[in-house]
């Protein structure tokens, strides 16, 4: 998802302070007779760092809520994060270098790092319902795979061709379409430069909404998962040995993060406001846009029938993810059972 935003940030690590609730608890312990200085007690908490793929914004609304509400502190975790941006190393590079304990990411970069002898494990997905989507105008809607045949598809990335090929092939349709290079704004769709625009449901539709257009009336947003390309986005990745050696900590981290996203679901504006006015305040983020992004993204953190957020069916790895990876020239990839471990997530969800 980072490709859909703009901004610049050099890599930095931000250790976040203890919550007010934790400070009160520490004060009570001191009053009871403990003589350790407050700083020494804080330092006894393990620091757990997350590598973000982009600048601090509404994409990470649940993280900001979990920090602000003290959910990580309640797990005995001092949380830290390394923001990303155009000039920052990739999240998986930071993970491999030991600069982070957890990282988001995308499947293709993950496979590339695995082929460089990194031993990673996938613990869930930030967006089990992939926000990748197609935008089309009501006069020429694209709502089914068959609607793609013969279309001019506005795309930012050459690799999008593999996705379209997968959708059409799965539906038994001819690979009859034209890819048209474009930028990150959907306005070329209005100009008639193409028939359909490859977008993210959490981003480009907001541009049309700000023009006064109404989704479902003036334009359509069709998730790729509804066209047969069901690929969970933002796999949550950690080193295999880290998970094995720190399983209770991993479960606690996931539990705190789950609580943050569940809380954000009750009020999607809250996490967005934290991102725009506190954690990402230096980036001049548009608060209204951030709130709308949070509203659009929140439903994608869980799918129907799943026990909770971040959960996805590992069978999708074999049926949807590997075929697209093979089309990108990646082979010799691990089986789902060797890469995906939803055990810690299952334990975290069950404890809520």
Image (tube, rainbow, N blue to C red):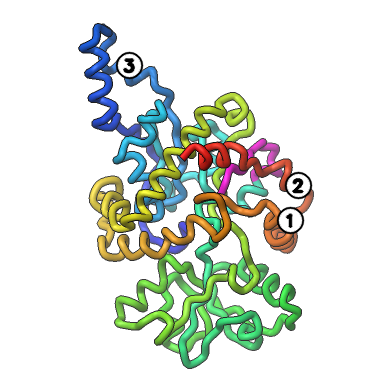
Question: Percent from the top left, x then y, of residue 262?
Answer: 40, 50
Callout 2 touching callout 3 (CB < 8 Å): no
The Cα–Cα distance between marks 2 and 3, rounded to whole angstroms, is 43 Å
Instruction: Report helix, strand or loop for mark 1.
Output: helix
Instruction: Report helix, strand or loop for mark 3.
Output: helix
The Cα–Cα distance between marks 2 and 1, rounded to whole angstroms, is 8 Å
What residue sits 29% from the left and 46% below the top?
279
Instruction: Report helix, strand or loop for mark 2.
Output: loop
Badge 3: how crowded within 10 Å, few (<14), some, or many (20+)? Answer: few
Nearer to me, 98 or 287: 287
Q: In terms of sequence position, does the residue under pointer 3 or pointer 1 come before the other? A: 3
Question: Percent from the top left, x then y, of residue 148?
Answer: 62, 83
Above-or-below relation of 343 to 283:
above
Image quarter of residue 178: bottom right
The residue labelled by disc 3 is 41
Badge 1: how crowded within 10 Å, few (<14), some, or many (20+)? Answer: few
Callout 3 touching callout 1 (CB < 8 Å): no
Position of residue 70 in the picture relative to residue 346 (left or right): left
Residue range of the region highlighted in magenta in the rendering: 113-124
Nearer to me, 324 or 283: 324
Question: Percent from the top left, x then y, of residue 342?
Answer: 61, 42
Callout 2 touching callout 1 (CB < 8 Å): yes
Image quarter of residue 315: bottom right
What residue sits 59% from the left and 24% below the top?
245
The residue labelled by disc 2 is 335
Q: In terms of sequence position, does the residue under pointer 2 or pointer 1 come before the other? A: 1
What residue sits 38% from the left and 60% below the top?
6
Above-or-below relation of 171 to 246:
below
């Amino acid at each position: 998802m980072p490709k859909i935003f703009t901004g610049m940030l050099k890599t930095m690590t931000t250790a976040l302070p203890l919550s007010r609730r934790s400070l009160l608890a520490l004060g009570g312990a001191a009053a009871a007779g403990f003589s350790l200085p407050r700083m020494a007690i804080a330092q006894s908490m393990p620091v757990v760092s997350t590598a973000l793929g982009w600048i601090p914004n509404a994409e990470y609304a649940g993280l900001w809520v979990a920090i602000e509400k003290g959910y990580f502190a309640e797990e005995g975790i001092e949380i830290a994060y390394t923001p990303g941006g155009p000039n920052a190393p990739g999240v998986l590079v930071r993970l491999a270098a030991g600069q982070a304990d957890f990282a988001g990411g995308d499947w293709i970069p993950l496979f590339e790092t695995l082929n460089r002898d990194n031993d990673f494990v996938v613990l869930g997905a930030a967006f089990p319902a992939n926000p990748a989507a197609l935008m089309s105008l009501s006069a020429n809607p694209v709502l089914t795979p068959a609607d793609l045949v013969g279309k001019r598809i506005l795309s930012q990335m050459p690799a999008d061709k593999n996705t379209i090929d997968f959708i059409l092939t799965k539906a038994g349709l001819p690979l009859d379409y034209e890819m048209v290079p474009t930028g990150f704004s959907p306005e070329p769709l209005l100009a008639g430069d193409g028939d359909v625009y490859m977008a993210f449901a959490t981003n480009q539709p907001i541009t049309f909404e700000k023009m006064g257009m109404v989704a479902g009336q003036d334009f359509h947003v069709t998730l790729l998962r509804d066209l047969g390309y069901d690929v969970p986005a933002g796999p949550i990745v950690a080193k295999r040995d880290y998970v094995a050696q720190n399983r209770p900590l991993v479960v606690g981290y996931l539990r705190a993060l789950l609580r943050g996203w569940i809380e954000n679901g009750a009020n999607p504006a809250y996490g967005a406001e934290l991102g725009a006015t506190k954690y990402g305040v230096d980036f001049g983020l548009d608060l209204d846009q951030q709130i709308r992004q949070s509203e659009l993204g929140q439903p994608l953190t869980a799918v129907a029938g799943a026990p909770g957020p971040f959960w996805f069916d590992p069978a999708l790895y074999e049926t949807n993810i590997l075929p697209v990876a093979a089309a990108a020239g990646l082979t010799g990839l691990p089986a789902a059972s060797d890469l995906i471990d939803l055990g810690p997530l299952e334990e975290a969800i069950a404890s809520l």
